[in-house]
Amino acid sequence: MPVLGREFYNRDTLAVAEDVMGKYLVRTLPEETLVCRIVETEAYAGPGDKACHSYGYRRTPRNSVMFGLPGCAYVYFVYGMHHCLNFVTEAEGEPCAVLIRALEPVVGGDSMALRRYGLPYNALSAYRKKNLLNGPGKLCQALDITRAQNGADLTEGPLLLRDDLPGVFLEDATARAILSGPRIGIGYAQEAKDYPYRFYYENSK
């Protein structure tokens, strides 16, 4: 199945944030390939969005990737402990991105569980399974995503996005209703804190 091309990301950020729901994130490591399905996102709509790192076209060494080509990974480090994965969107020079907030494991669940909890997937409690990938920092830890992947081209790897996976039979994600609501943890962003820029599946929260 072809990898999603740059044209997928070179669109309105809110559209990408919703359309990326249910897509497959493929993380290639030297020893294995991990696959997850995207189940929660947040849109950060660039210079006019007070919650966005590039609000007012502010450019820093940390966010410079946002000003580049759409379809690249923007990975930043926050609170001195967590990495967060974003997809750069819209035209070059228009710094927007989609934050990946939560995933579902598809291939490589044992490896993800070992990174998060030091246990194989089947040894996890129901609580730990639920919390394996349900946060930006958690999923980056599980997939070994760090600042080393900042700027990685999502059309080439080691991070890729696919629309489907041949031979993988899962509940059809498109059958679930996608809801929207305010983003999480951006109380500083004045009126932007209430924008319905977070997308998630019905009954997943």
Image (cartoon, helix red, strand yellow):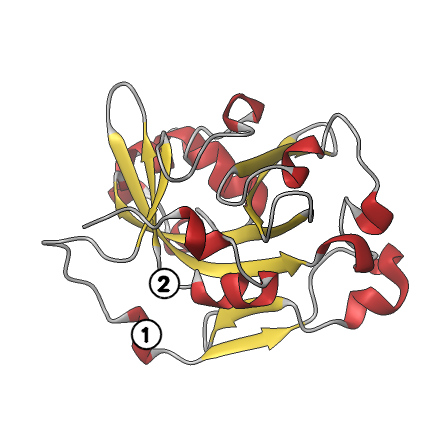
Going from the N terminus, do you reach mark 2 or mark 1 first?
2
Q: Residues within 10 Å of mark 2 (few under 14, many from 20)?
A: many
Work out whether residue 110 or residue 70 is closer to the camera in this orientation and state it.
70
Horizontal side of residue 1 vs 103, given as left or right: left
Picture disc at residue 174: 1
SS under mark 2? loop
Spatial CA span between label 2 and label 1 = 7 Å
- Residue 5 in the image, given as x and y percentages of width and height: 36, 48
SS under mark 1? helix
Above or below residue 152? Residue 17 is below
Q: Label 1 amino acid?
A: Thr
Reading the image, the residue beneath label 2 is: 22
- Residue 157 in which image quadrant: top left
Q: Are marks 2 and 1 in contact (CB under 8 Å)?
A: yes
Q: Residue at x 62, y 50 (%)?
A: 97
- Residue 170 in the image, given as x and y percentages of width and height: 20, 63
Horizontal side of residue 109 vs 14, given as left or right: left
